[in-house]
Image: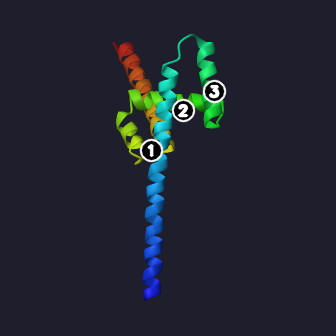
Amino acid sequence: TTVMNQSLQIQDEAITGLEDQTREIRVREASRLEHLARGYQAVTGGEMARRAYTTEAALALGVSAPRVDSMLGLAVFLADVYRDTAVLTRTGELSLQHAQIITDAGMVITNVTVTGVDEAAIARSIEL
């Protein structure tokens, strides 16, 4: 049973280590997103300056320019609309992938709600 207890202890420590590392990675990813957004917000000039920043950021991150655009979109939603979700990403409780799913779902729900409201308003105005 000593070998069994040691085995279980090692497994428990391994899982705890994985959880800690995962949380740290999530915190760093959220920090990286904040750096990206802060730099983009500081861009002065026009579209060319924004494209230059996006391209340079893509190289620094090792991703494509469209991926940087997507990351910037997520950063805006987290900062402006999904502040609770942003807190969860900054603390490592939630990954950026999960935050993206939440914001994407929220956009769909918002669009459905707005469309439903618009249709109801139009139907009501026709009745009157």
Residue nearer the viewer, 70 or 4: 4
**120 left or right, relative to 67:** left
Q: Amino acid at mark 3?
A: Glu
Mark 2 Cα shell of 10 Å, populated few (<14), some (14-19), many (≥20): some
Badge 2 marks a residue whose secondary structure is helix
Horizontal and vertical percent position of residue 100: 49, 38
Mark 1 Cα shell of 10 Å, populated few (<14), some (14-19), many (≥20): many
Badge 1 marks a residue whose secondary structure is helix
Q: Amino acid at mark 2?
A: Met
| CA–CA distance in space, label 3 to label 1 | 23 Å
**17 left or right, relative to 49:** left
Whichever of callouts 1 and 2 sits on the residue coming sooner in the sequence is: 1
Q: Amino acid at mark 1?
A: Val
| CA–CA distance in space, label 3 to label 2 | 14 Å
Report if residue 57 is visible in the image. yes
Image label count: 3
State which mark lies toward you, 1 or 2: 1
Horizontal and vertical percent position of residue 76: 46, 27
| CA–CA distance in space, label 1 to label 2 | 15 Å
Badge 3 marks a residue whose secondary structure is helix
Which residue is labeled 1 in the image? 27
Which residue is labeled 2 in the image? 71
- State the residue lying farthest toward the bottom: 1
Which residue is labeled 3 in the image? 56
**12 left or right, relative to 56:** left
